[in-house]
Amino acid sequence: MAGPAFRAAAVRVRVPATSANLGPGFDALGLALGLYDDVVVRVADSGLHVDIAGEGADTLARDEKHLVVRSLRTAFDLLGGQPRGLEVVCANRIPHGRGLGSSSAAICAGIIAARAVTIGGPDKLDDAALLELATEIEGHPDNVAACLLGGFTLAWTESGAARAIRMDPVASVAPVVFVPGKAVLTETARGLLPRTVPHVDAAANAGRAALLVEALTRRPELLLAATEDRLHQEYRAPAMPQSAALVGRLRADGVPAVISGAGPTVLALADEGSAEKVAALAGPGWAANRLALDTSGAGVLPLAGAGRDGAGGAVV
């Protein structure tokens, strides 16, 4: 049986940073942010060449261990077979190990690029399958759902399959991220979580998570109450005491602030009028950045010199 045919032209994929949990929505809620990694992939005659600029340029593998490459390979297997060779160029802007979804971005970039360079790829791997594949690689759907869909997402698993819905966050919400210089491994943060929690805490979080959907889509004045969490942030505080302290200071000042993902980045959900003032509260040791909301999610962008359909011919 013949293997798949691949486009000769390179494809460029752009993927957004994401913040998961958002306080009470542990492993369920996510928000796409206007900070992006770009990945360019071209099918080559042989071998593997990986080039990296920006975040991780001095530390990431440039071989089959690279997460984008691993994700490409996994997707190609589902699409019918591997190309003879690959050229992968990564322009990384999302900080690594900071709770802003850098691994989810790499995973989504790889599987979208594999689909895009495979002729007939979208018919073989539709958007629902993309979410399931990304979740399988990542291990949970919250970040990958926000990365793929953009906006504000609610993700869950049903009968073993990943599902997600996308909602439009209120346009006046102005995310501010406080990024520390030191990373915290997701595995370390997850290892601090208890196997069980008090029923009263679970009930409180369920109510706050439901309120957060209303607050982030319609009534942002409720965000401070809606971002209260009892399931994970307090337990993870020993691994990131400065982050926990910053969240406490911001919230005491009335700013809806949470640990972004597994941390240690702190996310503040400010409004247009207060974002610059909130960013100024960072203090030494933090890089504070006002980010836009991403509403498009991951996608394929045009490359200069490509044909009208971006195909540029085909190779087998």
Image (cartoon, helix red, strand yellow):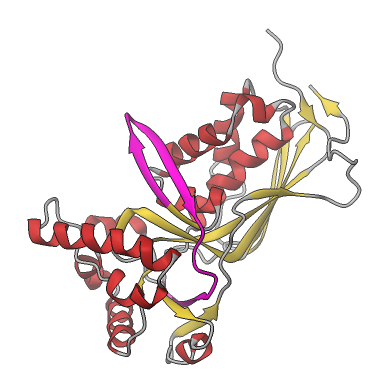
**From the image, which quarter does the N terminus lie in?**
top right
- Foreground residue, 47 or 149? 149
Q: Residue at x 82, y 25 (%)?
A: 315
The answer to whether one can see residue 6 in this image is: yes
Magenta stretch: give its range.
154-182
Residue 167 part of the magenta-drawn span: yes
Question: Residue 229, relative to residue 137: is it above or below?
Answer: below
Residue 188 part of the magenta-drawn span: no
- In the rendered structure, the answer to whether residue 252 lies left or right of residue 76 reads left
Q: Which residue is drawn at 58% across and 71% down?
A: 292
Q: Residue at x 71, y 29 (%)?
A: 118
Residue 192: x and y in percent read 21, 60
Q: Which residue is drawn at 59% across and 66% down?
A: 35
- In the rendered structure, the answer to whether residue 192 lies left or right of residue 67 reads left
The answer to whether one can see residue 66 in this image is: no
The image quarter containing residue 231 is: bottom left
- Foreground residue, 271 or 137? 271
Main SS of the magenta part reads strand
Residue 71: x and y in percent read 55, 39
Residue 293: x and y in percent read 56, 67
Residue 294: x and y in percent read 58, 62
The image quarter containing residue 203 is: bottom left
